[in-house]
């Protein structure tokens, strides 16, 4: 009886056919999420570049610098003398 069942009922397919496998790349939501994140990061980079180009970077007037950064902080408030 088991031989007849094997002949009449073929084994289930475990791998998709070539046509099904080729047409499924666009149905993957993680792929589209990756595309959206990539495009959003490129747009963010472009926006940061445009925004920074519009803003002036005025240099600070200090005597000592380390790699272009002032070595000591200066308060905008006048220091009170004791």
Image (tube, rainbow, N blue to C red):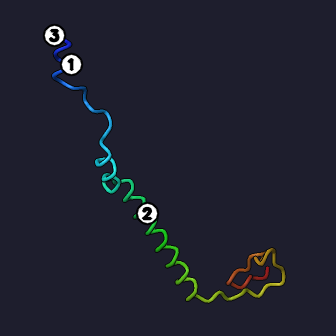
- Is tag 2's residue or tag 3's residue first in the polypeptide sequence? 3
The residue drawn where x is 81% and y is 78% is 65
Question: Where residue 75 appears, x then y in whole percent?
Answer: 70, 80
Disc 3 versus disc 1: distance between alpha carbons?
Answer: 9 Å
* In the image: residue 71, left or right of residue 29: right
Select label 1 or label 2 by which is in front: 1
Q: Foreground: 54 or 12?
A: 12
- Is tag 1's residue or tag 2's residue first in the polypeptide sequence? 1
Quarter location, residue 10: top left
Q: Foreground: 72 or 58?
A: 58
Residue 11, compared with residue 46, is above or below; it is above
Quarter location, residue 66: bottom right
Residue 36, compared with residue 65, is above or below; it is above
The residue drawn where x is 38% and y is 58% is 33
The residue drawn where x is 79% and y is 74% is 67
* In the image: residue 56, left or right of residue 13: right
Quadrant in which the C terminus is drawn: bottom right
Q: Which residue is mark 3?
A: 1
Q: Which mark is residue 6?
A: 1
Q: Which mark is residue 19?
A: none
Name of the residue lying farthest toward the right: 64
The residue drawn where x is 40% and y is 64% is 36
| Circle 2 SS class | helix
Quadrant in which the N terminus is drawn: top left
Question: Where residue 2 appears, x then y in whole percent?
Answer: 19, 12
Disc 1 versus disc 2: distance between alpha carbons?
Answer: 50 Å
Neighbour tally class for label 2: few under 14, some 14-19, many 20 plus, Cα within 10 Å = few
Select label 2 or label 3 by which is in front: 3
Q: Which mark is residue 37?
A: 2
- Is tag 3's residue or tag 1's residue first in the polypeptide sequence? 3
């Amino acid at each position: 009886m088991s031989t007849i069942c094997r002949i009449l009922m073929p084994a289930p397919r475990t791998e998709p056919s070539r046509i099904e496998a080729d047409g499924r790349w666009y149905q993957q939501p993680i792929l589209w999420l990756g595309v959206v994140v990539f495009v959003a990061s490129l747009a963010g980079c472009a926006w940061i570049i445009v925004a920074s180009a519009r803003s002036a970077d005025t240099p600070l007037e200090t005597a000592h610098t380390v790699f272009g950064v002032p070595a000591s902080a200066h308060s905008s408030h006048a220091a009170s003398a004791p």
